[in-house]
Image (tube, rainbow, N blue to C red):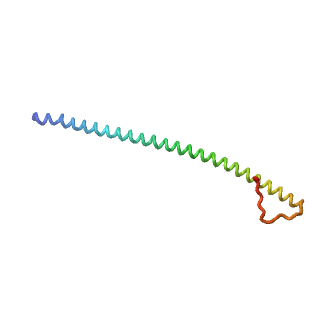
Amino acid sequence: MLSIGSNAAVPAQAQIKVQAARREADQAQRTARTLEQSAEQAQRSADQEQARADGLTRQADGANRRSDAAQRTLAGLESGLQQQSRFNPIPATVGRLVDAFA
């Protein structure tokens, strides 16, 4: 037969276990919230970096188009100079720079 003292100890131990489980659940919930906030911040940072990368890609595309246009202009000028030199026997000056954008 159990004594009255031991019967009182059983509910007290159960109460301690409930309190410990409550603390553990609260801590897990706080940890989950903190991790969610960190994940949200990381996603915002990733979105910003993606937008930055997209902007840089657009800038690179524009620079490539300008480069292609400049290369075509240069090729046209060089072709024109070659044709002109065939029909005009005046020798070209060596080392003379041609400014395609002047």
Residue at 78% x, 63% y: name it.
96
* Residue 98 location, quadrant: bottom right
Residue at 73% x, 50% y: name it.
69
Residue found at the very far front of the displayed protein: 102
* Residue 58 location, quadrant: top right
Q: How many marks?
A: 0
Looking at the image, is 98 positioned above or below residue 47?
below
| Residue 1 in view in this figure | no
| Residue 102 in view in this figure | yes
Image coordinates for residue 94, horizontal then vertical, percent: 80, 66
Looking at the image, is 33 positioned above or below residue 94?
above
Image coordinates for residue 50, horizontal then vertical, percent: 55, 44
Image coordinates for residue 80, horizontal then vertical, percent: 83, 55
Looking at the image, is 67 positioned above or below residue 16?
below
Residue at 49% x, 44% y: name it.
45
Horizontal side of residue 90 vs 41, given as left or right: right
Horizontal side of residue 44 vs 29, given as left or right: right
Front residue (pair 65, 30): 65
Q: Quadrant of the N terminus?
A: top left
Horizontal side of residue 42 vs 79, given as left or right: left
Front residue (pair 51, 1): 51
Residue at 9% x, 35% y: name it.
3
